[in-house]
Image (spheres, helix red, strand yellow):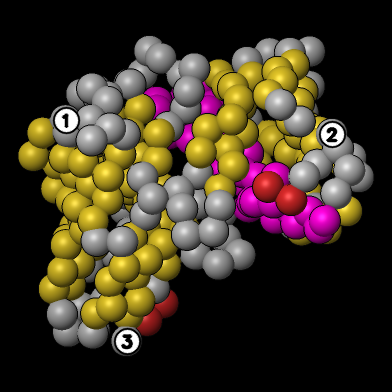
Amino acid sequence: EDQVTQSPEALRLQEGESSSLNCSYTVSGLRGLFWYRQDPGKGPEFLFTLYSAGEEKEKERLKATLTKKESFLHITAPKPEDSATYLCAVLPEAAGNKLTFGGGTRVLVKP
Amino acid sequence: ETGVTQTPRHLVMGMTNKKSLKCEQHLGHNAMYWYKQSAKKPLELMFVYSLEERVENNSVPSRFSPECPNSSHLFLHLHTLQPEDSALYLCASSPGTGDHNYGYTFGSGTRLTVV
């Protein structure tokens, strides 16, 4: 069974305090791993897609990396506006169009 | 209007009511989805509609009934719901099987409260 586990569940950071979020996954074959950001009361917003181990992608203060078992979302020098829930999802090879999501990490950045 | 639009944004209904959630996408995508998001639980896929497949999720209670009249519109018909059905219901769309560069595009969701 395909599984996605995110840790920690919640993260409190001071502005400027860099940290990393973890997404561990087990799938029969990976077509893609996705990171989303979700603000309260809104739908998830796409951030990155990673396809193969060793791949990295960056957007402003966010950097996503991928290994064969996990992905990390690094937040460098975060600002209060980076406060959100970050979701990880995998697209297994045999799943058609269906993503499997992790439980998310709630990030709060205090000024 | 662009993207994925869901209406209503908020809905309060009694257990004996019948209501419908609506989703419309203006992206030219070929697949649409209903997800349920409850507190402290991962997003749960309820239904998938695409040119390639229509997936009825056997684990979803029959009090939830999807309808997809065309590739741009998706409905979720609700009847005799239970309080535990209170959640954020998210609609999403994707280009289809061949393009995964952007995953899904989500709507803002309908916050459903069953009283």
Rendered view: B37 above or below B114? above
Locate residue B73: give its quadrant: top left
Q: What residue type is disc 2 on? A: Thr
Q: Nearer the viewer, residue B24 or A72?
A: B24
Chain letter belonging to callout 1? B
Residue located beneath label 3 in the image: B115
Q: Nearer the viewer, mark 1 or mark 2?
A: 2
Label 3: which secondary element: loop
Rendered view: B105 above or below A9? above
B106 left or right, relative to A33? left
B32 left or right, relative to B22? right
Q: CA distance from mark 2 to mark 3?
A: 43 Å
Q: Disc number at residue B83?
A: none
Which quadrant is home to the N terminus of chain A?
Answer: top right
Q: Give neighbour class at mark 2: few <14, some 14-19, many 20+ (Cα, 10 Å).
A: some
Do the residues indicated by labels 1 and 2 lie within the same chain of the protein? no
Question: Which of the two discs, 3 and 1, labels the residue nearer the N terminus?
Answer: 1
A66 left or right, relative to B44? right
In the rendered image, is residue B59 in sight?
no
Q: Does the magenta-highlighted stretch encompass residue A109?
A: yes
Magenta residues (range): A82-111
Q: Nearer the viewer, residue A60 or B42?
A: A60
Which quadrant is home to the C terminus of chain A?
Answer: bottom right
Residue located beneath label 1 in the image: B71
- Residue at point 49%, 17% (across, down): B101
